[in-house]
Amino acid sequence: MPEEIEVPTEKLHEAIHEELEHEGGRFLKQIALTTALLAACAAVASLLAGATVNEALVLKTEATRLQAQASDQWAFYQAKGIKSAVAEASRTSWLAIGKEPPAAYAETQARYAREQDEIKKVAEEKERQRDEKEREADALLHRHHGYADAVALFQVSIALGAVAALTRIRLVWLGSGVVGIAGIVMSLLAALR
């Protein structure tokens, strides 16, 4: 019986092993690159989320200040109304005893009415400004939620990238890319709001 023919498999085995390492190394580099890009996008989206919520809080604070000023003006308006009512009661007392009231009562009442009109305009302007600040803040909070959702998608995408690197499953890496693209779209939609 002839001796078995030896096929030089040692070199073939080494070549296959090197090719697998080379191919796996390239795949890991692709995963690392996309994960790094997604992490950068997540950082930007996180900064934008923080900036929009901070700006919204400033606007909400400004709206609260304007509401306090409007409330002060309405209290002032009511005080003028009470003073006017006191002047009217005094004038009525004079009329009740059959005497002509001093002209100062009528003049005082007219002055209080004019002052009330001015105070009312100021109070309503403060309320209009308050409502404007509230609308701006609400829009910013809505934008903030979009950025926050994008950050969550980026985090899921990065986690899938880590799983793909550990398992070397391309489908998981593609899933990471799809979720990352969804995060980018979410960020862009939030920026356009």
Image: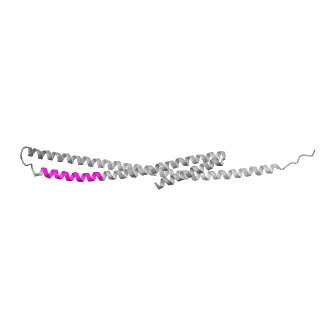
In the rendered image, the quadrant that contains the N terminus is top right
How was the colour assigned to the protein in this rendering?
one colour
Q: Nearer the viewer, residue 53 or 136?
A: 136
Q: Is residue 112 magenta?
A: yes
Near-viewer residue (154 or 100) = 100
Which one is nearer the viewer's eye here, 36 or 179? 179
Q: Is residue 140 magenta?
A: no
Residue at 27% x, 53% y: name it: 122
Q: Main secondary structure of the magenta part?
A: helix
Q: Position of residue 150 (x, y in %)?
A: 52, 49
Q: Is residue 58 left or right of residue 109?
A: right
Q: Position of residue 23 (x, y in %)?
A: 70, 52
Q: Which residues are magenta?
A: 105-124
Total marks shown come to 0
Which residue is rendered at x = 64% and y = 48% of the image? Answer: 171
Q: Residue furthest right?
A: 1
23 displayed left or right of 6: left
Residue drawn at x 17%, y 48% is 84
Residue positioned most to the bottom = 192
> What x and y, as percent, mark residue 124?
29, 52
Would residue 191 be found to the left or right of residue 80 on screen? right
The residue sitting at 47% across, 48% down in the picture is 145
The picture places residue 179, in percent across and down from the top left corner, at 57, 49
